[in-house]
Amino acid sequence: MKPLLWIAPLGLAAAAWAQVDVPATEPPPPGGTPEVTVSAPQPRYVAPTQRDRIGRIWAPVYLDGQGPFRLVLDTGANRSAIIGRVAEQLGYRSRTDRMVRLRGVTGTSIVPVARVGRMEIGDLLLAPVDLPIVLDVFGGADGVLGNEGLADKRIVIDFKGDSITVKRSRREPAPDGFVTLPITLARDRLLTVDVTIGRVKAKAIIDTGAPDSLGNSALLEALKRSLKEAPDTDIIGVTLDVERGKRVPVPTIAMQNIRIRGATMTFGDVYIWQHWRMTREPAIMLGMDVLGVLDQVIIDYRTRQLHLRTSS
């Protein structure tokens, strides 16, 4: 079986579908290596976006006025990052002697850092910004757009309209037809929500940079799924470290009134679960195989709410 490459594409088709049952009216220690956890001119406010062949969102981002560069929107990354080709295009002024520790799903590595004076998309403006330079494993994208600078922002992802909006949150309520879930911010500014998978309650991390969802072993054990026929798969992170997992069909995923059926997911206690200290209780990273079946996703960091809509 092909390896499951986190942040890089694998071409796993999303077999899940969604329906609504009821319409819804920190700085590094001194002397230590900083750590980072990481996935033609156009209007900058409502930015037309693209999805790659596994459905991840490419957001147009301007760096020091150059671009737009196509960065994968990755709510599971605490910092943005670029590939080497982009660093070369930005030129010598972006070069630094700094190194940071990159934490991926399956391991860590030490990578160099580029510095830009400005990073812009919509209402998001960061200045200056240090961008780790990572391996070119993004399937055509120029890097990842992480969650730094989003504390007061509202992101609207319209899959049907093929657009992404990043603007300042005005604490506006969800439009009609959306289901609203409260968000808890966990370590590394992770977005977590409560979900039910079958009869098992679990913590779900909203990870728009992951092509496929990933559960921990505690969730797999709670679901009592048989592993006799479960195929093995390689899980390969942005650092190219490899761990093993199991591909298992899962029961219905419920997020309040939204039901997602027909999903098959990978399970394994990979490195990042240990780093996040999320190995004891059932937990799952919801990737684009699940999120991509929705019509719209609104993430409001200021109100700490997740708004979801599906046409089914």
Image (spheres, rainbow, N blue to C red):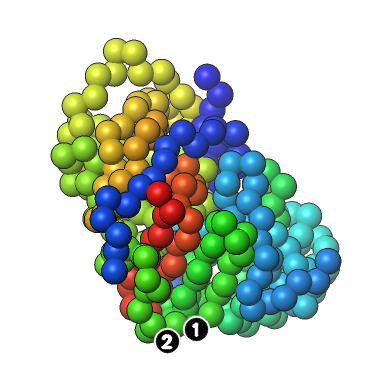
Q: Which residue is mark 2?
A: 170
Q: Is residue 11 left or right of residue 14?
A: right
Residue 213: percent from left, percent from top: 41, 41
Q: Is residue 223 left or right of residue 82?
A: left
Q: Residue at x 20, y 32 (%)?
A: 223
- Residue sitting nearer the eye, 291 or 102: 291
Residue located beneath label 1 in the image: 168
Q: Check residue 213 in the rendering and tell me which mark sits there, or answer none.
A: none
Note whether residue 156 is visible: yes
Position of 269 relative to 162 (above/below): above
Nearest the camera: 110 or 187? 187
Distance of label 1 from label 2 (alpha carbons): 6 Å
Looking at the rendered structure, the kind of residue marked 1 is Arg
Residue 87 placement (x, y as % from top left): 76, 62
| x 49%, y 49%: residue | 292
Q: Are marks 1 and 2 in contact (CB under 8 Å)?
A: yes
Q: Position of residue 172 (x, y in %)?
A: 39, 82
Secondary element at image label 1:
strand
Q: Locate residue 144, reporting x and y percent.
A: 60, 58
Label 2 element class: loop
